[in-house]
Every structure is written in C-alpha cells, then in structure tokens.
Amino acid sequence: MDGLYKLHGALGSPYSMKLRAVLRYRRLPHLWLHGAAAMAATANVKAPVIPVLKYPDGGFANDSTPLIYDLEARHADRGIVPPDPAQAFLAHLIEDFSDEWLTKAMFGYRWLRETDQVQMSRWLAFDQMKGGGIRQSQAGAEIFRGRQVGRMAIVGCTDENFPLIEASTRAVLAALEAHVTDRHCLFGSRPSLAEFGLYGQISQLGVDPTPGAMLRADYPYVLRWLLHIDDMSGIEGEWDAPGAPPAPVVTALLRIIGALYFPFLIANATALAAGAATFGFTAMGHDFTQGTFKYQAKCLADLRARFAALPAAARAGLEPVLAETGCLAGLTA
C-alpha cells in the first residue's frame, strides 16, 4: 500500500503508545508491529530503542517528538501542533515535561515494588514472546525484571526519590481529573501533542497493578480518558481562538512544571556544566537526587530557544501566565 507507515513498538512502551495514538488520530495508514519484529527494527536506527517508525520510502527513524514534528511537516491534515504560536509552545512544554519527568512515574510504579515488578515483567515477556510456554515466558520475565530494576537509580527512580515522583504524578492526575469531565482536550476540541505526551506515560499507569488501582480509586475519569485518547480517529474538532486564556488545566500543569520541572532541568544542566556526576534539588517539599543527563540539558536549551524564537506578540502574551506559574525564569535565565 502506498503511503503505509510501519510502527514498531510495544504495549508496555509509553512512547510507542503515544506515537500509535498520533498515527490513529491523524488517520495515517500504518501497521502496528510488536514483539520480535519491533526489536529487530531497532537495528535500523542509531539508538536501538522503540518505537521505530518505518517510512513509506523505506527509511527508519525513532524518538517520538522529532517523529511527530516530521509527520507535521509531511502531512498537512489533522495536525496536532496548534497554529497559534503561543498555544503551540505551551503544548510542546507540556509534552516535554511528560516525556522527561512523568516517565519517572511509569518506571517507579512499575519497578520499585515487587508486586508490580513480577506482574509487569511477566506481561511484558508475554507480549514479546507470543507463546513458547509459561515456563519459558516467566524465565524471560526474570531476566528483563533484573535488567530494569538495575537501571532504577540511573533514572532517579529510587525509594528516596519516589515521594516527589508520586506527589507530582498525583498533582497532574488531579488537574486532569478536574478537566476531562468538561472536555477531553487542552487547547480546544481537538488533541494537541500535549495530550498525546500525557497519554503515553499515563497509559502505563492505567494497566500496572499499583497505579492502576490508584487511578480507579482516585482518578476514574482520567483512567477512562486514556481509552478515548488512544484512538481519536473519529474526532474533528477546532482549536481555541488565538489569544484565548489557557484552560485551567493548562495553568495547573504549568504550575507543576514551574515548581518542579524547571528546577529539575536547571539543576541537571548546572551540575553537568560543572562536571558533576550527580545533582539534587527540592520541590513540593521533597528532596530529589540523580545522575546528570546530557539529553535533559538539551531539552532545557531547546525550550529556551523555542521561547526566544516566538513572535514578539506571542511571547509577550505568554509572559504573564508563565511568570505567574513560575515558568518564565527558567525560560529566560
């Protein structure tokens, strides 16, 4: 079929689920390939991680955010970047926060507690192997479990750090729970990259044992919202008018980003510039420490460059809400 994309991913990968939902909403013809086929596709990209998208012309690429922007450039219809530059920036900021911070919730809930480790490693092995018998599947699960648990400290998902991870996750879920009963989307009646970024990470919380129980008990409409974002191919919708005040949920998310995400990014970048191997900061009444990451320093630089490149009117229009929510200083330092 001409124009057919092939998405190689996994149900247990938040970035795979994010990109699959984007392809579905955008009505781009695609195949969903998982298991051994997805792992084999990683041989075609520099960083061997899923999701991997095979283009109709035979090329391969991964990293969900650049892929989203590339699809925006290739296909005009049903784009997920708002045409208003100010709204587009806010959507990107929320998506970046989801990709780089909320993923810690997915890792922490999945791999800190033995109950979740056992259940999820077995499910993920089941997804990957697609047969072969329960003994072989569970043996593979233990290998994968050991590898993932061994990586926890590297990404900052430790028992000591988890109070901040959980507090910030609950704050995000509470903001969404208050919003989604009014409308499903953040910048109008159609989804932006912000919704898909949030969906990718929270989709994993919805199926894992401990956070799934939390969502059912405390955030039931967010849990149901995930099923809607998963396939919005039937949604038409409109964007909010340019210059319209951000929805309360956007302001609530910006407050979390200002209180937590920019301090995290700045502490990492400062430590990296000083040649330090680790960094720490305090937010929402909790301490947090982890190793430095070059990629997240690039995220901070990219956010600042995007803000500086905004048209003057869009930047001026955003400054009050960014200042009020504690985001402006991180963008202009």
Image (cartoon, helix red, strand yellow):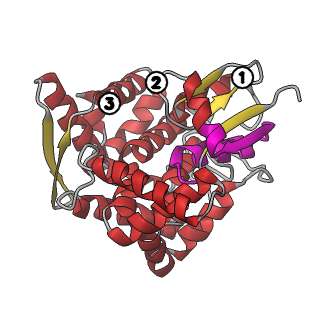
Q: Are marks 1 and 3 in contact (CB under 8 Å)?
A: no
Q: In this view, does 222 lie above or below 75?
A: below
Q: Label 3 belongs to which residue?
A: 300
Label 2: few (<14), some or many (≥20) within 10 Å? some
Indicate left or right for 243 with 152 as reference.
right
Residues at marks 2 and 1, CA–CA distance in whole angstroms: 22 Å
Q: Which of 201 and 153 is in front in this view?
A: 153
Tell me, yes or no, whether the highlighted magenta stretch contains residue 46: no
Q: In this view, does 260 lie above or below 123?
A: above
Quarter of the image where one finds residue 51:
top right
Indicate left or right for 292 with 124 as reference.
left
- As shown in the figure, which amino acid type bears the numbered disc 1? Arg
Disc 3 is placed on an element classified as helix
Tell me, yes or no, whether the highlighted magenta stretch contains residue 12: yes
User: Residue at horizontal 56%, vertical 52%?
Assistant: 186
Q: In this view, does 80 lie above or below 325?
A: above
Q: Residue 310 carries which label?
A: 2
Q: Which mark is residue 74?
A: 1
Q: Nearer the viewer, residue 318 or 41?
A: 41
Instruction: Give the position of the C terminus as an image quadrant.
Output: top left
- As shown in the figure, which amino acid type bears the numbered disc 2? Leu
Q: Which mark is residue 175?
A: none
The mark that comes first in sequence, 2 or 1, is 1
- As shown in the figure, which amino acid type bears the numbered disc 3? Leu
Where are the magenta residues, as a range?
11-38
Label 1: few (<14), some or many (≥20) within 10 Å? few
